[in-house]
Amino acid sequence: MIISVENLAKKYDGYTALDGLNFTVEHGDIFGFLGPNGAGKTTTIRIMTAILKADSGNVLIDGHSIFGEPLAVKKIINAVPESNGYYEWMAACEYLEFFSHLYKEKISKQEVDKLLEIVGLHGKESHLIRSYSRGMRQRLGIARALINRPKLLFLDEPTNGLDPKGRRDIHDLLIDLNRDHDTTIFLSTHLLDDVERLCNRIAIINYGKIVRAGELDRMKGKGTIEDIFFLSTKEGTL
Amino acid sequence: MKKSILFLSMIFLAITANYATASAADRITASIDPPIIQANMGDKITYVGTITNNSDRAVTNIIAYISLANVTQGRESPMDLEDWSANKAIKVDTIPPHGTYKGQWPMRLIDSGSYVAYITVVDKNDNTPISSTMSRLEIKRVLRLNPNNVLPVAVGEPMIIGVILTFIVIRRRKRII
Amino acid sequence: MKIAYIMQKEIRESILTPKGFLWYAITSMILSVLSYLFLTNSELSLLDQGQMLYMIMNFITALGILIGLVFGADAFAGEIERGTLEALLLSPITKTEIATGKLGAALTNWGILFAISLPYLFVVGKGGQNLFVGIAYLALLGTFLAITFSAFSMGLSSRIKSVKNSLIISFFIFLLAGSPIFLSAAQRGTWFGRIIDFINPFAGAINTFDSVVIDSQGFGYQAGRVAIICGYTLLSLWFLKRSVSRLEM
């Protein structure tokens, strides 16, 4: 398994964000992490990407403890966070070059061009990020997240605010990444369509706890994903 | 008899009082040199004050200081010598009988105009301070447009930075938006 | 090397920009007016040259502190508000390395200010006393103060996470540090004034400049004040390290 989360807990000023979270993710999964707003999805991702400390529990990423070896973990993962801000004064190629230097010493122009081509931004490398549309920025964020060819890619609401074409393009990109580059994808979203199209396994979080987890097709049975979701997140379910 | 004694006492007092008044002024005299100075702003000059003890006894612990007054038409006022002179007052321990003391008062001429300078001597044993005559001081204004070569720096440096700034702005605008 | 890339990014973002260079242009114009007035104005030109040098050194130091405080206030809080910090934190770079890179950029700012001031110092101090030793002390103490106030402001920025509030506190700190200017000579001689002078690193610096440039005192005389300023520098660096280590999204 590539992710192992055990008894993860986190409180903010007395409010319990995560309450003993437990789940695993296998290599090669496109794993959907669902939940209503405020369920704890972003908190979970931030802990797993070592930018937030948990109060208790354990997280192993590809065998490395996130708390003991955060730098080692960061070298094999990457993420497109929900609050995806950019250095708007930079051109796209400059942006990727800057982040590449934080992972390794040099990145060639060819590698930059290839990354931008993968995400569909070929020909826009010299444009300032300021001029990019929302969809283009999301793609650029994914390009940045691919700089270190991560084994594990976290995406937090990656299609929020995109038009249907934009969403479809992102979907196709993620499927290609998973299939052709063997990248495990951890997708946090509340958009059930995205989950339906992309994920093979899911976990549903509510009030900081996993309420349901497993293979999507098996969980759906003869119902729909909406059925599973609303049933799992109904008030009083816990 | 009583009237005679009273009359003689009054004459005696008048004579001694007059003598006392005269003695302070005559016992010590002060003078200032040079009597006239014409100079430019920024110049450094030195006044020499001569204090003469005209009496048969030594004078001790007297204080001599220099004063300056602005007598320029419309700007008459006493001057604060804070920036003009470091040592405005001198204490003289002793001047022997019929001896003299020469004190020096260096001064930097801060502002233009017409001035008078004089030395005043104070002896705590007397009732009246003693002043010298006044020395006339004419200070001319000097216009300096480029002292220390300030203009090349004062004008040149902002221009250079302005050029760099313009270059940065142009370079920014050329980037594709 | 990662620190160098962070520093390079910061310099490109804050210094090599029209807004960044406008600060330098304004500084240069103020210094031009000051130095020209000092040397040509009827009364100002007769100030002792050491006095002129001292006044320009104070101005540059105060400006260095102010720019350091403003730069520091935006360092982390600005990145959080613009949403760019998370991507940085995701990268395999420690928070201390990020802070060091940003501090390096703040110091670059000071270095440019100091370089801009040099021609003015030479022109105003030419022929006067203690010009070179004065410049050396400005370089030394100005650098320490730039580090002190930038590091403190950056630490504050990482804790408060709001640019506006960081700036308000930074300006307040600047006024406190500049308080010697508002006290009269008589007030500074009181026990209260002496305490302020003793604990205030900016006051320590300007007293040192006075002592070196105007009174021609040697290093032995300044050693105590320099040591206190160094102490503040170390304290502010410790505060910065501690603050960023606790930084979380």
Image (tube, rainbow, N blue to C red):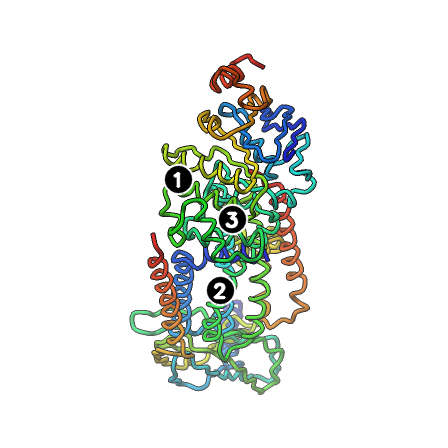
Circle 2: is it few (<14), some (14-19), or many (20+) Cα within 10 Å?
few
Q: How far is disc 1 from disc 3 in space, using C-alphas?
A: 28 Å
View extreme (left): residue:
B74
Taking the spot 50% from the left edge, 43% from the top edge, the residue there is: C77
Taking the spot 58% from the left edge, 19% from the top edge, the residue there is: A211
Residue C175 at what x, y percent from top left? 50, 50
Q: Is residue B12 visible?
A: no
Q: Earlier in the sequence, mark 2 or mark 3?
A: 3
What is the quadrant of residue C220 in the picture?
bottom right
Q: Chain of mark 1?
A: A
Circle 1: is it few (<14), some (14-19), or many (20+) Cα within 10 Å?
many
The secondary element bearing badge 1 is classed as: helix
- The circle on residue C112 is 2
Q: How far is disc 1 from disc 2 in space, using C-alphas?
A: 40 Å
Residue C156 at what x, y percent from top left? 56, 44
Residue C178 at what x, y percent from top left? 52, 54
Question: Which label sits in the foreground, 1 or 2?
Answer: 1
Residue C30 at what x, y percent from top left? 40, 64
Taking the spot 47% from the left edge, 40% from the top edge, the residue there is: A84
Identified by mark 1, the residue type is Gly
Taking the spot 56% from the left edge, 31% from the top edge, the residue there is: A43
Q: Nearer the viewer, residue B97 or B63?
A: B63
Residue on which disc 1 sits: A135
Q: Where B39 sits versus A76, above or below? A: below
